[in-house]
Image (spheres, coloured by chain):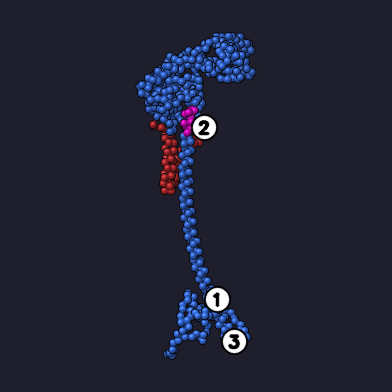
Amino acid sequence: MPHSPETLSFLAAVKRIEALTQEIRRDGLAAFEKAEAAYTEVQELRAVLNERIYELRRRSA
Amino acid sequence: MHELRDLIGWLRQRLRGEHCVRACILTVEAAGPDSYLLLLGEAQASLSYDPPRLKVRLDAPELALIRAEHGVDFDPADLVNRTVEVQLRTGLRQRFGRGAGVQAKLMALLSLGQIPLEAELERERMLQRLRLEGARFGPDSWIEPEDPHHIALVVSEHGEARRDVEHVLQPLEAAGLLRLHRISASFEGAGAERSLAEALARVTSLHAEYGLSATLVCRGGGPIEAFRALNAYTVSRAATADRLPNLIVGLGHAGTPRTALDAVAACSEPTPTAAAMLVRHLVERTGLWAERALAAFDAAIEEDLGAAGRIALARATTAFDAALQDLVTAAEARLRQLDRAVEQSLLQGLSVAVGGIVRKEPDADPVEVGPLDDTEDDVLLSKALALVIATDTGFIVTRVQDLSAGLPLLLQFPDGAVPVRVEPLSSTTH
């Protein structure tokens, strides 16, 4: 099912952060080292997800 | 030119009257104890985009009369979706500060139509046909959209349903969280069936283009006749799951009978607002998803950091304990060395002191024993032989004359003791 870039970005972000979480849960500190190395990527994922959360909170406020 | 009060008086005269009308009760809402507001619609749906509606008040005295005729258990809510013939009294209502308006009061219930079964039979026939054709529809066709974004909205251009749906979803659209594809359709009248089928076909093409997450089909309340098009085969066939994604319908209100489209839909909500709220909740759920994903990520990081910290702390504690143990061991060894040194020193001092006392005659004056000097010989002596002890008596031997041949001795050195025996040797001068 095709989506616009914005929604694809959200979906990609939320799925990527879930994948990172699973890696950390599975591989422990080794995966954490990888996540730390991907610090910039994690920050970008956070930005996308937090934007979604912020918009929804703002709308429901 | 007339004064405004003259116009109001003219209107009051014209609006005052009693009328017998045939209508369909669309909604009934309580307006006080034994007082209700009834919304009347057409008994036969018309082609109008703005179907006539009239709000009528039913007060306690008139309700008592109706109950006297139809039974004390008569509930005005039972009138919903029923065709009635009623006697109305109309007039001009002048409310302070709010202007004039038309008021209508229900004076008598002249006849009450039977609960229509025709529409239900038609709906069941149509659903049976769809099943025979193997069409996929109903709640089982619902596929939860991960990130609902493109939503099709099929709604009457002029109805209240559109306003209700827009009220709920427009803020989300303004924030860029979803995009509504609005498609107008006629829900009532002779052309309604074709209009709805065309609108749904348009949704199918939009789905191919954008990948719709859901399709909303909404209309407000109305007489049962006005819902006939929603029971039509062409409309329901165009709305099955193989053509439309996640069909959500909000048709009429809570009292509206189920239509075939309700049965075909993946999700049937009682009102347009409820249908729109469902979409809104789907969008809001993505926010919860994002929150949970971030929280889980942070928790994983935190727990792993905690585990790493605990491991490092355990290692440091173990190393500290080992170092401490080494220190204790070294200290104990050193203390043992000190003990021996002190013991040796004491014994040496004692030996010197005893030697001085023994050389003194018993009746001689006491000899003052001076402090032990750390002469070079003493130092060398302390590093060499420390003590000679007669093994038999345990006395410390301090003089040569106390020795005799064959006497067993114990030579106490700083690092241990050696048992020996005195054996005289002839000395030779070289």
- Residue A20 placement (x, y as % from top left): 42, 42
**The magenta stretch spans residue B283:** yes
Q: Residue at x 42, y 18 (%)?
A: B123
Residue that label 3 marks: B361
- Residue A2 placement (x, y as % from top left): 39, 32
Q: Disc 3 and disc 2: Cα gap in Å?
A: 116 Å
Task: Please tell me the numbered disc located at residue A59.
Answer: 2
The color chain B is rendered in: blue
In the rendered structure, the answer to whether residue B302 lies left or right of residue B133 reads right
Vertical order, B405 against B301 (above or below): below
Vertical order, B408 against B81 (above or below): below
**Residue nearest the viewer, comparing B95 with A26:** A26
Q: Range of the magenta residues? A: B276-285
Q: Residue at x 48, y 28 (%)?
A: B278
Q: Earlier in the sequence, mark 1 or mark 3?
A: 1
- Residue B92 placement (x, y as % from top left): 60, 13
Can residue B190 be seen here?
A: yes
Specify whether disc 3 shares its chain with disc 2.
Answer: no
Task: Please tell me the numbered disc located at residue B346.
Answer: 1
Q: Chain of mark 3?
A: B
In the rendered structure, the answer to whether residue B207 lies left or right of residue A51 reads left
Amino acid on which disc 1 is placed: Leu
Q: Disc 1 and disc 3: Cα gap in Å?
A: 25 Å
